Amino acid sequence: MARYALVVDDDTPSRKIYGGMLSKLGFDVTEAVDGEQAIALLKGSRPEVILLDLLLPKINGVQVLDFIYSTPHLNATHVIIITAHTSYKHTLQLREGDRYYTKPVPASEIREYLIEILEVSPY
């Protein structure tokens, strides 16, 4: 069975970089350009990992994170926050295994984390 990931970012180059990295690790990748689209996708899906920006149009990333954490079918989903917004780093209560990175973060750093936490094959 294919692994599934969601990349949520309003910045097209960031979505393409992280989506490409996830594809190379064997994930089927879906992209969302704003929080509203992300929540709509998450209502009917169960990604193994979500890469989430916090500064999103329509519905911000904090609200998307609240949705993820309050939705039972997403309990096992890992969330990796990748954002330029540093002020939430010390106030957000992340689940064990979830991560907060401040942009710019190299895709290789995210890749190494995924290999470790999800036991993804590096090839």
Image: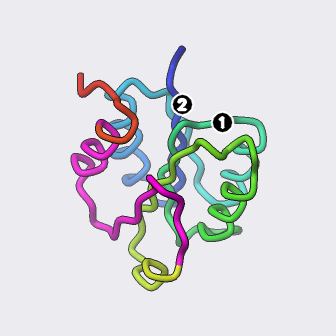
Residue type (three-letter) at the residue carrying disc 2: Tyr
The residue lying at 41 percent from left, 59 percent from top is 99
Q: Secondary structure at mark 2?
A: strand
Disc 1 residue type (three-letter) = Arg
36, 121: nearer the viewer: 121
Do the numbered discs 2 and 1 sit on residues whose CB atoms are within 8 Å? yes
Residue closest to the eye, 13 or 45? 45
The residue carrying pointer 2 sits among few (fewer than 14), some (14 to 19) or many (20 or more) residues within 10 Å by Cα, namely some
Q: Nearer the viewer, residue 119 or 3?
A: 119
Q: Is residue 60 above or below residue 69?
A: below
Residue lying at the far top of the rendered structure: 1
Q: Which residue is mark 2?
A: 4
Upstream in the sequence, badge 2 or badge 1? Answer: 2
How many numbered discs?
2
Image-based side of 65 in relation to 91, left or right = right
Where, quadrant-wise, is the N terminus in this rendering?
A: top right
Mark 2 and mark 1: Cα distance apart in space: 8 Å
What residue would you read off at disc 1? Answer: 46
Q: Name the residue located 23 percent from the left edge and 55 percent from the top edge.
A: 106
| Image height of 107 relative to 121, above or below | below
Which stretch appears magenta?
A: 92-115
Residue 8 belongs to magenta span = no
Pinpoint residue 11: horizontal percent, then vertical percent.
Answer: 45, 59
Q: Residue at x 72, y 52 (%)?
A: 39
Point out which mark residue 65 bears: none
